[in-house]
């Protein structure tokens, strides 16, 4: 399963990419609005750092505007994936952009029906938001399992990009279900590393080693 960072913050991205576990980046208007500077330059820099798919979202709400913005975003770098919201206009824009060879990530997916329609218009990725469903007492992970089943039934090549992840269990469950990608805030990726037994085990190995060295000395 691929791991993306859900962030527009260059420091977070620069600190995680050298670990070798990051396959791409997702941004959205809320994330980029937090970052000072020109968003196009930030996106370019992100692409140069990660050298992998980098989602950049349109803010137009009509298909024509989305297509125009999508083309502008795609021109920033070959790694850019144009993100459009799941609306009727977004579906039209996805069809048009995908037909001209631009990769599209259809976002704000909250039902299997929406994922199915996005796949039918050639989306490269669908982004179901698991955390926001959990927030309203609906299982986000059930949605992932339904989309996995539907896409397998028809061999859609659209990848399932699990978004709005809030903790390590979202990532583990997504991997068990066979989702293609999880996009995670940096703090969720950090949490994947942690296990107290690893820390205790390493401390003990080092202590035993030092003890043996001092006896030999
Ligand atoms: O990029 C979209 C997404 O992952 C949103 O997450 O935490 O704002 O629901 P969140």
Image: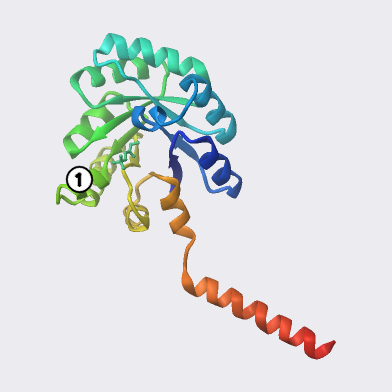
In this picture, residue 68 sits left or right of residue 35: left
- Compared with 156, 94 (above or below) is above
Image point 57% across, 40% down: which residue? 14
Residue 81 location, quadrant: top left
Numbered disc 1: secondary structure: helix
Residue 177 position within the rendered picture, expressed as x and y whole percent measured from the top left: 31, 53
Q: Which residue lies at the image location 35% right of the left edge and 54% below the top edge? A: 167
| Nearer to me, 63 or 35 | 35
Query: Residue at left 27%, top 41%?
Result: 129
Q: Is residue 169 above or below residue 3?
A: below
Could you say where residue 61 lies in the image, as x and y percent from the top left?
A: 24, 16
Up-down relation of residue 144 to residue 89 (above or below) = below
Mark 1, other Cα within 10 Å: few <14 / some 14–19 / many ≥20: some
The spot of residue 156 in percent (x, y) is: 31, 35
Q: Is residue 78 visible?
A: no
Q: Is residue 145 left or right of residue 44?
A: left
The quarter of the picture where the C terminus appears is: bottom right
Task: Give whichever of 101, 29 is nearer the camera.
Answer: 29
Q: Quadrant of residue 35?
A: top left
On the image, numbered disc 1 is attached to which residue?
133
- Where's ligand 1: which quadrant? top left
Q: Is residue 34 visible?
A: yes
Q: Is residue 207 left or right of residue 75?
A: right
Q: Nearer the viewer, residue 215 or 178?
A: 215
């Amino acid at each position: 399963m691929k791991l993306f960072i859900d962030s527009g913050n260059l420091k977070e991205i620069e600190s995680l990419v050298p670990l070798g576990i990051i396959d791409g980046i997702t941004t959205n208007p809320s994330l980029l609005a937090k970052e000072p500077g020109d968003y196009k330059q930030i996106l370019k820099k992100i692409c140069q750092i990660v050298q992998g798919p980098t989602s950049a979202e349109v803010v137009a709400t009509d298909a024509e505007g989305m297509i125009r913005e999508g083309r502008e975003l795609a021109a920033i770098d070959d790694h850019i994936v144009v993100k459009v919201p799941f609306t009727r206009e977004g579906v039209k824009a996805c069809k048009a952009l995908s037909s001209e060879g631009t990769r599209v990530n259809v976002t704000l997916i909250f039902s299997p029906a929406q994922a199915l329609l996005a796949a039918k218009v050639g989306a490269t990725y669908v982004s179901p938001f698991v955390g926001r469903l959990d927030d309203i007492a609906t299982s986000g992970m059930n949605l992932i399992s339904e989309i996995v089943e539907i896409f397998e039934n028809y061999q859609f090549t659209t990848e399932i990009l699990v978004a709005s992840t809030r903790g390590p269990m979202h990532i583990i469950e997504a991997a068990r279900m066979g989702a293609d990608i999880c996009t995670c805030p940096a703090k969720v990726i950090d949490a994947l590393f942690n296990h107290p037994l690893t820390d205790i085990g390493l401390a003990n190995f080092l202590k035993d080693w030092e003890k043996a060295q001092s006896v030999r000395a």
